[in-house]
Amino acid sequence: MIPVHFPNVVYAELLKLYTRSAGLMTLAVSGLVGMVVAAVAAWLEYGIRTGMVQGPGVQGDTTQFSAILVGDWALYGRNFFVLPLMLLLVTATVVAGEYTDRTLREVAVRPLSRLSILLAKLLALLSLSALSLFFTFGIAFGAGLAAFGLPASWELLPALLAGYAASLLSDLAIICLGMLASMLMGGVGGVLISAAFLLGADLALRGFLTALNFFGVSGASGLLPWTLGHALDVWLGWKDGWEPQRFIVVVGVAIGAFSLAQLRFSRMDVP
Amino acid sequence: MGTHALEVKGLVRRYGARAAVGGLDLVVEEGDLYGFLGPNGAGKTTAIRCILGLIRRDAGEVQVFGERDPVAQRATVGAMVETPRFYDWMSGRENLRLATLYAGRGGEPDIDAALHAVGLTERQRDKVRGYSLGMRQRLGIARALVGKPRLLVLDEPTNGLDPRGMKEVRDLLRELCRRERLTVFLSSHLLSEVQSLCNRVGIIDRGLLTAEGEVNALLAARGLKTRVEIGVTDRRAAVEALGRVPGATLIGDGEGGRLVVELDRLDAAGLNRLLVQAGVDLHTLVPGTGSLEDVYLQATSQEAGVSG
Ligand SMILES: Nc1ncnc2c1ncn2[C@@H]1O[C@H](COP(=O)(O)OP(=O)(O)OP(=O)(O)O)[C@@H](O)[C@H]1O
Ligand SMILES: [Mg+2]
């Protein structure tokens, strides 16, 4: 199923991904998130130090500001909508987009199984996710060091880095869902709409479960950790404690979505 | 039975209730320049897509150099289907480079050779976005060539090319066939192109092969003879002389006042010699496509892919 020249195929996908505007834009936005978050932190710290910003718990105390805090905020900034959306867009461009603009045909006439084509795309997209995390962290942390100097304690750094690493899993699930949507919808717009639909449905489900819980229905709260949106936030575990359910769901969704996408792709006409 | 370059047996592809290809059988021998002829909507592109494994087939079998596995088959095939598409933010050369990566065969020398063969060496560094229709078509042919193929499958390769481009592509295909022992399977609806280029033809109509064979054998089997059109200075003398030349029959008038002559066991050079001997000077001698046209018209229906 996987040919000996598979590394060449992955290399070709990388060459395309890192020259097309959607891929470059993703990297640029990743860096931007780090930069913006660092700037906001520096501004806040300055405000608090000079008494411009006041409030309960602030009281002129700026000891909490550090490069690690900036890295923490940048992880939130990245994972709330911005980068997942960009990755979804890139996935849609690379899979659904190549199907609609017919360039997928030029790959499909080569001695490659459909599985190896999809797998090469998955690996290229995962590299983009990893590089994006690296950019966000590197720039946020670097700017944090420049603004606040060396952190007083390095204790939290390994956990924060684990949070970044876990984001790779959320990204993986999103990429696989994007691939499945690409196979079913056959258009970049369709992928974005179906993703919005899926996340909306998940949000509704979580709202429903929370309501049931509120009215005392037993078992409802037990289901909450198994919902998609909750699982996609697996990276939050670096602060809240790692939940095995999240890992199970996020990996299960990734494997399931990729398998279904491959099943569909292997039978699909590539015009 | 030796292995054929391409063998298709009982190929069926349906769209809804309509069979776009309804049980196609054909054989292409190694070294053939095979012309796949048929009217619009006959099923040429659909058959080619099935052969390449791009689309599902409902029945049938395809072998390429005896290989049955569809993925392994494509290792020896270079293909161009309909209008070729490219990563158009990249240069022509970069697109060919990607093609060699996906093929797992071919390198920089093959890319140079392919670019040279289609006359794109000068523009190779330009982004494909800025290429004209004909340049894209040429690049598509180059892309089919870069992976060291043994069989070329080309869907209307001269589509969109200017007259010089058409001739260059025909010359290129002939040369590849002769020099690199490449086998070429090309679809077309240009009769003159197929007649001047191909040694074998298959005619498809409404998804079925209605005639197949060597061009000459096909003509003979149908009782059709080669036709030529001749332009003469002295029409009356020519008509008279034609009556005395064995194997030549005057059929009627062609374009530009030329005479249409049907030949039987006589070629154009022979006719010329005999007429000159009879004291008639020819100023033009045009090989007629009328002959293959007749086979084609007999083998295809009137309406373009509408029924079925
Ligand atoms: N995706 C499709 N869905 C439905 N019908 C299709 C599809 N593709 C092709 N067909 C039908 O199959 C038949 C054959 O089409 P095909 O494109 O193979 O013809 P062709 O011989 O290549 O014609 P042309 O000379 O115009 O390129 C036509 O009747 C066409 O309408
Ligand atoms: Mg066609």
Image: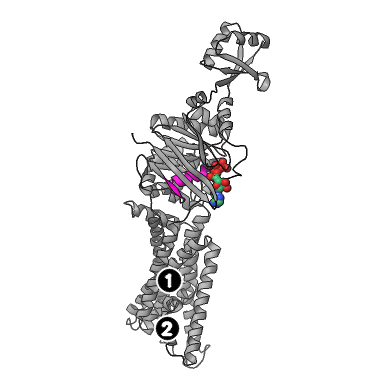
Any part of residue A18 in sight:
no
Q: Chain of mark 2?
A: A
Give residue A239's mark: none
Q: Which mark is residue A223?
A: 2
Residues rendered magenta in the picture: B37-60
Q: Is residue B40 magenta?
A: yes
Quadrant in which residue A236 is drawn: bottom left
Residue at x-position 57% and y-position 31%: B298
The amino acid type found where label 1 is placed reads: Thr
x, y (%) of residue A115?
Answer: 38, 57
Helix, strand or loop at label 2? It is helix
Where the N terminus of chain A falls, by quadrant? bottom left
Left or right of A72: which side holds B226?
right
Which residue lies under the disc numbered 1? A136
Q: Amino acid at mark 2?
A: Leu
Residue shown at the point (43%, 74%) measured from the top left? A140
- Looking at mark 2, is its residue's CB closer than 8 Å to ligand 1? no
Q: Is residue A208 above or below residue A13?
A: below
**Foreground residue among B5 and A225:** B5
Depth check, front residue: B302 or B190: B302
Q: Residue at the spot x=49%, y=67% of the render? A: A86
Number of other residues with Cα within 10 Å of mark 1, as a class: few under 14, some 14 to 19, many 20 or more: many
The answer to whether B39 is drawn above or below residue A149 in the figure is above
Chain on which label 1 sits:
A
Question: Where residue B25 sits in the image (x, y, percent)?
Answer: 45, 39
Residue B68 visible, this angle: yes
